[in-house]
Image (spheres, rainbow, N blue to C red):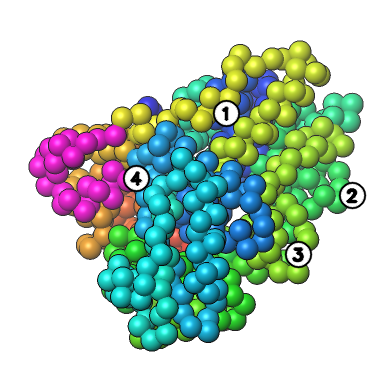
């Protein structure tokens, strides 16, 4: 499907002209899921996002689609059950191209963390809650078996390990695909459109006053119902309805480190415990890299200025080096960091780690529906619950009824309708000259839509050239991102359509002028716009390195 900057311009005109049943504020995974579900049920829907789709928390997660094993420690059994069910739906039906099984090792050491009997009980319950929808059965391993399964483990004090499965997920691409699915179902999605106020009639919210961030032009998006799904920015939207409104969120910061995988040596995902507070830290294999995370600390600052500081990085390095002392990981080994905020819907608990991740839906005095909390894995269920409430409200107040029930549980996202098999991938490898590992990574990003990239290369073999030597990204992806993924800025491509900013040693700054040149040729940028794009990319790179100076 075409999903380009031209589509965005058409959507801008529609948004300013039409009245919608629902307008959703926030283009992260939750807002995208709501727009998708609402459009599939037949509601006219607009989605506005002040930046790029998913440019907040939804592209800076641990890249896990998981049941939430750690929540069992806090007796959140219903949350784990829900997450296990949603994990299965994403893996089997909704995003099979972007979600895949991921083996985990949970080592148990003498005098550190939970004992073997406690881990065994936790694993049994985790499997039981997933029931027939589990990814794979857990196994308890002895020390020798554990070291055979994961040679990166420290031998000294190892009592055994649990071997189990969760899933790896391509978070930014899942978010983008959900937006595209909403568009395909009839929604009008817009990135770089910021809510600057609410439209009201007789005290009730009836739309959004918005501003095109790229041009400064203001517009009014009229709707019967406004949904606040702005995540960490939700409080700002709440204040537009009622400055004295006190529902409020608890924001916590989570950061991740990106290091070369050979520095850790893990073959599987590894769950370890921090010696400081006992919370879980994950070592996630991501092709040539290991992603280490996450932290969970209260945050009081500007949601637009979140970054990892030296204390955050030291916490994660301490956890790795305590459990795996032979690794001797240092800050010099960190290629980059990324940080994001969790908008927790409940404020209780002495530690942010203990606060429930359940989602909550509530209505403001002006009739705006708001959703907060939840997990990436459960976004579809969160959206379903919200649209159920919206449908009730629209029926009661406007006699506007849905044409269908929720269908997102059985509807694949774009690229997931039919997965390329091994024979097809082999043919594409031969046609493009790309390597098997490259093709595997691209298939994980696009699924069947990888065919668009292949056709671009077949038409011009220079587009098979790598953007950064040693990374899987090729120049054809730039054109694909512009014409099929609504990549509007250089940051969109370097941070979310690819991960070059986080994975290249220099953040991709050395290749950025060439990428910007190609984007400029397609979108008609002048030199001033090119320079602005390069400057903003450099600023983002500096945020990933700020821990070195703090």
Q: Residues within 10 Å of mark 3 (few under 14, many from 20)?
A: few
Viewer-side label of 2, 3: 3
Q: CA distance from mark 2 to mark 3?
A: 24 Å
Front-lying residue, 462 or 96: 96
Which residue is labeled 4 in the image?
445
Q: Residues within 10 Å of mark 1 (few under 14, many from 20)?
A: many
- Judged by its main secondary structure, the magenta piece is helix
Quadrant of the image containing the C terminus = bottom right
Residue plotted at (61% across, 58% down): 71
Q: In terms of image quadrants, where is residue 504?
A: bottom left
Q: CA distance from mark 4 to mark 2?
A: 43 Å
Labelled pair 2, 3 in contact (Cβ < 8 Å): no
Residue plotted at (47% across, 37% down): 89
- The magenta region covers 419-444
467 w.r.t. 15: above or below: below
Which residue is labeled 2 in the image?
244
Question: Does label 2 or label 1 sit earlier along the sequence?
Answer: 1
Question: Does label 1 or label 4 sit earlier along the sequence?
Answer: 1
Front-lying residue, 417 or 333: 417
Labelled pair 1, 4 in contact (Cβ < 8 Å): no
Residue 274 location in percent, x, y? 54, 77
Viewer-side label of 1, 3: 3
Residue 45 location in percent, x, y? 61, 25
């Amino acid at each position: 499907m075409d999903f380009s900057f031209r589509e965005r311009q058409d959507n801008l005109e529609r948004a300013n002209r039409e009245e919608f049943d629902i307008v959703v504020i926030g283009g992260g995974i939750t807002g995208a899921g709501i727009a998708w579900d609402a459009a599939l049920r037949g509601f006219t829907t607009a989605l506005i996002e002040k930046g790029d789709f998913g440019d907040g928390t939804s592209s800076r997660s641990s890249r896990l689609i998981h049941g939430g094993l750690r929540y069992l420690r806090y007796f959140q059994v219903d949350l784990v059950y829900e997450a296990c069910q949603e994990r299965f739906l994403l893996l089997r039906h909704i995003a099979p191209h972007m979600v895949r099984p991921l083996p985990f090792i949970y080592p148990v050491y003498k005098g550190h963390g939970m004992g073997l009997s406690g881990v065994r009980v936790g694993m049994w319950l985790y499997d039981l809650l997933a029931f027939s929808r589990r990814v794979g059965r857990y196994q308890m391993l002895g020390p020798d078996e554990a070291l055979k399964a994961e040679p990166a483990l420290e031998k000294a004090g190892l009592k055994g390990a649990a071997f189990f499965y969760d899933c790896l997920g391509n978070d930014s691409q899942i978010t983008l695909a959900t937006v595209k699915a909403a568009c395909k179902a009839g929604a009008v999605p817009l990135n770089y459109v910021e809510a600057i106020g609410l439209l009201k009639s007789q005290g009730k919210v009836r739309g959004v006053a918005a501003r095109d961030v790229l041009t400064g032009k203001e517009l009014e998006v009229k709707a019967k119902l406004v949904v606040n799904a702005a995540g960490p920015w939700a409080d700002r939207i709440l204040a537009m309805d009622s400055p004295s409104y006190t529902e409020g969120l608890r924001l916590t910061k989570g950061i991740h480190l990106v290091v070369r995988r050979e520095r850790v040596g893990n073959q599987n995902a590894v769950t370890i415990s921090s010696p400081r507070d006992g919370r879980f830290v994950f070592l996630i294999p991501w092709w040539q890299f290991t992603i280490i995370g996450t932290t969970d600390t209260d945050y009081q600052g500007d949601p637009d200025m979140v970054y990892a500081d030296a204390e955050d990085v030291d916490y994660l390095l301490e956890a790795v080096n305590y459990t795996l002392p032979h690794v001797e990981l240092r800050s010099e080994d960190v290629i980059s960091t990324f940080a994001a905020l969790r908008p927790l819907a409940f404020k209780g608990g002495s530690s942010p780690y203990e606060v429930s991740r359940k989602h909550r839906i509530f209505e403001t005095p002006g009739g705006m529906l708001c959703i907060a909390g939840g997990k990436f894995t459960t976004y579809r269920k969160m959206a379903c619950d919200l649209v159920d409430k919206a449908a009730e409200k629209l029926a009661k107040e406007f006699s506007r009824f849905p044409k269908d029930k929720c269908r997102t549980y059985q509807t694949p996202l774009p690229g997931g309708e039919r997965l390329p098999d091994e024979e097809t991938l082999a043919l594409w490898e031969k046609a493009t000259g790309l390597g098997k590992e490259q093709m595997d990574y691209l298939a994980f990003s696009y699924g069947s839509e990888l065919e668009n990239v292949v056709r671009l290369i077949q038409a011009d073999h220079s587009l098979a050239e790598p953007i950064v030597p040693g990374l899987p990204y090729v120049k054809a992806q730039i054109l694909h991102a512009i014409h099929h993924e609504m990549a509007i800025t250089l940051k969109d491509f370097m941070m979310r359509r690819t991960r070059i900013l986080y994975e290249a040693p220099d953040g991709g700054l050395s290749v950025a002028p060439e990428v910007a040149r190609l984007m400029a040729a397609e979108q008609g940028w002048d030199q001033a716009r090119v320079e602005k794009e390069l400057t903003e990319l450099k600023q983002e790179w500096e945020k990933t390195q700020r821990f070195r100076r703090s």
